[in-house]
Image (cartoon, helix red, strand yellow):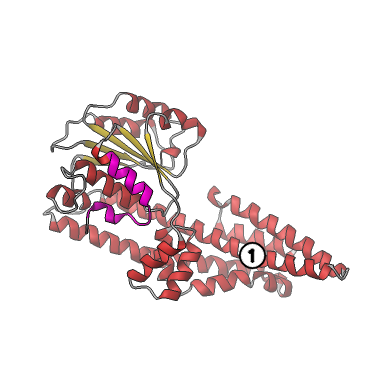
Amino acid sequence: MGDVFDLVLGQERTVAAMRHHARQPVHAYVLTGPAGSGMPEAITAFTAALQCPRHGCGECDVCRLVIAGADTDITIVYRSGTNWTVDEFAEAERVSRRRPLGSGYQIVVIENIELSTSSSGKLLKILEEPAARTIFVLTAESMPESLDTIWSRCIEIAFSPLSEEVITDYLVRSGADLLAARAAASASGGDLKRAQVLARDADLARRVALWQAVPDRLDTVTAHTAQLADEIVAAVDSAVAPLAVLQEEEMERQRDNAREMGVRGVAGRREIEARFRREQLRFRREDLRFGLSTLTRAYRQRMLLGLEDLEDGERRSRLTVEGAINAIELIDETSRTINSNVNESLLITNLLLGLSRC
């Protein structure tokens, strides 16, 4: 490893900003960007650079300790539920008041602060009255207007979705077949973790074909929508399996790092496992969205073909176009409800019943 920022993939401007701030730090940063853009790796690299006397050399004991997750002056504060609570921020404040044991900073990491709208007043107070040798590293996928006052207390470091080219190159260097890497990168939406899972997913092509075939299957077997819904839900279930394998490999690396540093057990194991569960839930939802976008493209293709035939004035083509438009609107409405903790099987069944009437 050249230095700690080699951990961060495809974020050149972001890395340049972190290098600068590692040398001239302020008391609070907020890292913003979409899931899968490399933020966990960036947090490790940035906090190591803040602690390292050489600003992230990647070779010294300080860097190795941070990378192993064993620096006692770096604390990741975890939330127990969907949203942050005042008590959880009070714990973050308690940690932030501790004097660093080493020669660096007391660094407090709080992720997904966009989920703090009901407790943001406590977070704001913490940021307004920081201890002298404390640095806060916050993250958010996006910042709602209600958190503008918190944003104004921080330096923002923005992340972009990773390009397909960057993801493809990374997957190939990691041992993936070129065609599989391209397919995974295309389906990932710029999310590296999702791409890593899809590159290992032998069923990706079959799932895409399943979604693409929905319009034709509904045309011919409209009475079997429940069976088709079961097939789709089963396909989503199978899509999560490679992620579980990837997570176990990550946990094993954590164990190896801990053993190398002479640390007994993995620090924050329970919290890591909770993060894994959240990742699996997010992956399921993203796979459903990917399937729905594939389905939208299938109906859009029907619409385009119908529009071509409309030039000949065919009434059937007009009905095809209207049906495709209605189907696309219904799919879009379904996609917006995915985060509402609805029953997936019921959601897909209701969608298919609606599409069968379009």
Magenta-drawn segment: 3-21
Instruction: In the rendered view, tell whether residue 93 sits above or below residue 57.
Output: above
Residue at image location 88% in from the left, 68% down from the top:
313
- On the rendered structure, is 175 left or right of 355? left
- Tell me the element at label 1: helix
Magenta stretch encompasses residue 344: no
The residue nearer to you, when weighing 300 against 329, is 300
Across and down, in percent, residue 106 comes to: 21, 35
Instruction: In the rendered view, tell whether residue 92 sits above or below residue 286.
Output: above
Count the labels in the image: 1
Across and down, in percent, residue 358 comes to: 75, 62
Quadrant of the rendering where the N terminus is positioned: bottom left
Amino acid type, label 1:
Arg
Residue at image location 41% in from the left, 63% down from the top:
167
The residue wearing badge 1 is 297
- On the rendered structure, is 128 left or right of 218? left
The residue nearer to you, when weighing 22 against 267, is 22
| Residue 341 visible, this orientation | no
Across and down, in percent, residue 92 comes to: 30, 34
The furthest residue to the left:
262
Q: Where on the picture, by quarter, is residue 208? A: bottom right
| Residue 295 visible, this orientation | yes
Magenta stretch encompasses residue 14: yes
Residue at image location 36% in from the left, 24% down from the top:
125
Of helix, strand and loop, which mostly describes the magenta segment? helix
- On the rendered structure, is 330 left or right of 7? right
